[in-house]
Amino acid sequence: MRKFNELSLEQIRQHVDTAQAYDVYQASVKEFEQRFSGSMSWKKSTNGKFYLYKKTNGIWKSLGPKEPETELTYKQFHSGRDASKDRISRLAQRLDQLAPVNRAMSLGRVPLLTARIIRALDKLGLIGTAVDVVGTNALFIYERMAGVHIASGLLSTQDVDLLMDSRFSLRLIAKDFSNKGLIGLLQKVDHSFRPLAKNGYRAANRDGFLVDLIKPTPKNILSSTEKSRFSADAEDLQAIEIEGLAWLVNSPKASVTVMDERGYPLRFSCPDPRAFALHKLWLSRRADRDAAKRLRDEQQARVVAELIRKYLTHLSFQSGDLQALPLALRQLASELNTVSANKNETRNLTPDW
């Protein structure tokens, strides 16, 4: 069985076209939110004069009395707002047109519910700042970086692991998120999500899809004041501390545009593939880890190491950007640099009917 298949030139071209359209769409939405959010209107004061007011985040602010300058501001705001909406609408239609083509070309990879959760977090600016995606879902980033598709057996997952970086600022979180936290966001994506335990780290929906909130074990457990949740809500998830995750938090990050199962793009951040491979190999040696998981850990570590060796040759396990990882972990790279020949690997002579 082959571990991965290289993308064709047509698939790569389609992926690039979709990623470019998505980048322009994201930039246009950001511009709209920064320049044209809220509303602007004239209000008559008690003295009978009209004043221009701008509403932002529910607060009205006067921009001055009605005069040529404020009239121009009013006109530019509304004309610019309409033009921006039209641009975003056209770009959204473009992504709608690309999606079925992406599906037909087998580019849709990320499970749909996983993608929707990640997009919801990204919309709040949490991906790459307060949260990174770890575990099996990171493989979707690595395979896109390498221009291949990894064998489906190594990608099979019915969960998503969210690695919390306790160094983020709560002040940067939107108010509607900080009130209900992660569980509130999950329930907006799928109303059936519920915590599996009070003050627990895991939520599940009615279909058994799991979301885990995890974080590194602090250096000083007794005196640690690090954040473990996103809100004070009693039902919100509380991150569980796991040994070894500090290596992933402190490693370089990888981020590219990938496709969900319906062919729509998304982008998320995850640990550098070298850190992923080393961490997975380390996990596979843990005697306290489930035997089946240890086997899967090693398989994933070796397939990512092979991607690095064959397609991501600019990434070196000896590079200085991995110095945040412990020496003992970096020394495991020597075991990943050996080529594992698969005698059972054969070339298919017939289509996959």
Image (cartoon, rainbow, N blue to C red):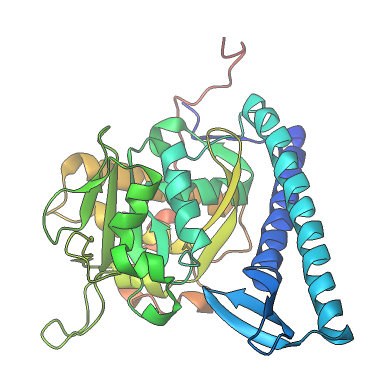
Instruction: Count all numbered tags in the image, as a single digit.
Output: 0
Residue 194 in sight = yes
Residue 338 picture location, percent across and down = 45, 51
Q: Nearer the viewer, residue 183 or 337?
A: 183
- Where on the picture, by quarter, is residue 255? bottom right
Residue 44 picture location, percent across and down = 68, 80
Q: Residue at x 78, y 66 (%)?
A: 78
* Residue 268, placed above or below residue 325: above
Left or right position of 38 against 232? right
Q: Nearer the viewer, residue 27 or 131?
A: 27
Q: Residue at x 46, y 26 (%)?
A: 1
Q: Nearer the viewer, residue 246 or 278?
A: 246
Left or right position of 198 against 63? left
Residue 134 picture location, percent across and down = 38, 56
Q: Residue at x 83, y 64 (%)?
A: 79
- Where on the picture, by quarter, is residue 34? bottom right
- Where on the picture, by quarter, is residue 177? bottom left
Residue 310 picture location, percent across and down = 60, 49
Residue 248 in sight = no
Left or right position of 74 against 283? right
* Residue 230, placed above or below residue 6: below
Left or right position of 336 against 10? left
Location of the C terminus by quadrant is top right
